[in-house]
Image (tube, rainbow, N blue to C red):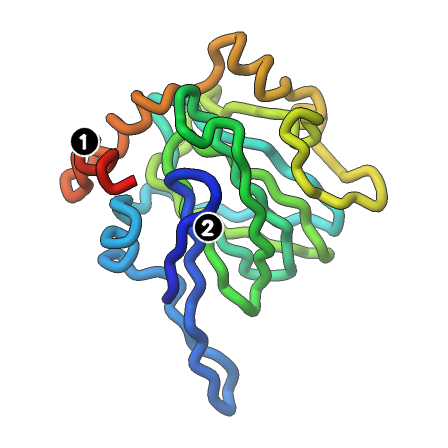
Amino acid sequence: MLITETAVLDAYRAEPEPIPDHRGLFYETLRHEALLAATGQPLQVRQVHFTVSGRNVLRGIHGTTLPPGQGKIVTCVRGAALTVVVDLRVGSPTFGAHDVVRQDARSGTALCLADGLGLAYLTLSDDTCMNYLCTKEYVPGTIIDIDALDPALGLPWELSEPPVRSARDAAAPTLDAAADRGLLPTYEDCLLAYSSFPDTLTSEEAAKNR
């Protein structure tokens, strides 16, 4: 697989190399040692969940408070989605920056997101299913919600009609408002969280490699 950096620090794109034959395709979605070598982030799964959505559903931007934090590896296992990662870490060199990845079931492209990063996606087809591998179990009350249509972020959704959103997502604050209210994690705290796994780089080592 090919693991590359995105425009957001500590967010990576993982693109598998499909092996086709007369039955279809085989590919490795992720491999722990390759991910650790490329990113300094271990693959230690504590929760797996899925979302299933109709076309033109906009979910997010969602992050997680620290603690507990929740790194994610996200793939599209059915349908297609336009996925956006946003840096929510106050003090990060890429705070407020974003990158966009088209994900679909055939490509198998995954996004690997460290603690403190926000995720949003717009579904491009009916019955789109997204798979999340999470480094921590969900804790009620720890989700950070940011408006995916925040004009200051200017995310390139290219909407042709109003998206379908939850009431909570539609009422979410802008990034600046969330920062002013102290709702966002700091980059320093996130670096410390990265070193909480026994086989992860220390925060100092991680910082040197970024």
Q: Is residue 185 left or right of residue 36?
A: right
Amino acid on which disc 1 is placed: Glu
**Among numbered discs 1 and 2, the one appearing first in the sequence:** 2
- Name the residue rendered at 59%, 61% in the picture: 104
- The N terminus sits in image quarter: bottom left
Residue 111 bears which disc, if any?
A: 2
Q: Residues within 10 Å of mark 2 (few under 14, many from 20)?
A: many
Under circle 1, the secondary element is helix
Image location (x, y in percent) of residue 92: 40, 26
Between 105 and 103, the one lying in front of the other is 103
Q: Are marks 1 and 2 in contact (CB under 8 Å)?
A: no
- Name the residue rendered at 82%, 38% in the picture: 162
Rendered position, 203 above or below 34: above
- Name the residue rendered at 44%, 54% in the picture: 13
Query: Which residue appears farthest toward the top when viewing the image?
Result: 181
Image location (x, y in percent) of residue 66: 36, 22
- The C terminus sits in image quarter: top left
Q: Is residue 55 left or right of residue 144?
A: right
Between 181 and 155, the one lying in front of the other is 155
Q: Quadrant of residue 65?
A: top left
Residue 10 bears which disc, if any?
A: none
Query: Which residue appears farthest toward the bottom when viewing the image?
Result: 22
Rendered position, 197 above or below 50: above
Nearer the observer: mark 1 or 2; the answer is 1
Under circle 2, the secondary element is strand
Q: Quadrant of residue 190?
A: top left
Q: Quadrant of residue 168?
A: top right
Residue 204 bears which disc, if any?
A: 1
